[in-house]
Image (cartoon, grey):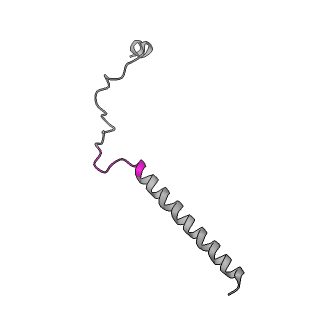
Amino acid sequence: MKKKDILLIGIAAGLAAAAAVFFFRKKNQNAEEKPPKKAPQVPISNPGDQSEFTTSASESEIG
């Protein structure tokens, strides 16, 4: 084989390895961003008591 062919094969293998590492790291990063499977879910229609949040004066006057 010519040296040029060996060099091109080496570059292609290096790029393939770099792409594989990049995609595996992205996959692991995305997995960390998701909540755990058994995380408690808050119902959107009734989120519960809102007393822990303070209301401003304008909100109290309006409603």
Q: Which residue is drawn at 57% across and 70% down?
A: 16
Depth check: give the residue in front, 62 or 24.
Answer: 24
User: Is 24 left or right of 36, judged from the image as shown?
Assistant: right
Q: Where is residue 58 in the image (x, y as percent from the top left)?
A: 44, 14
Q: In which quarter of the image is residue 59?
A: top left
Number of callouts: 0
- Give the quarter of the figure containing the C terminus: top left
Q: Position of residue 61 (x, y in %)?
A: 41, 12
User: Is 9 left or right of 35, judged from the image as shown?
Assistant: right
Asked whether 54 falls inside the magenta stretch, the response is no
The magenta region covers 32-39
Q: In which quarter of the image is residue 60?
A: top left
Q: Where is residue 35 in the image (x, y as percent from the top left)?
A: 36, 47
In the rendered image, the vertical position of residue 56 relative to residue 29, given as above or below = above
User: Is 20 left or right of 36, judged from the image as shown?
Assistant: right
- Give the quarter of the figure containing the N terminus: bottom right
Is most of the magenta stretch helix, strand or loop? loop
Q: Where is residue 27 in the image (x, y as percent from the top left)?
A: 46, 58
Question: What residue occupies the far front of the structure in this picture?
Answer: 3
Q: Residue at x 70, y 81 (%)?
A: 3
Depth check: give the residue in front, 4 or 41.
Answer: 4
In the rendered image, the vertical position of residue 62 relative to residue 52, given as above or below = above
Q: In which quarter of the image is residue 12?
A: bottom right
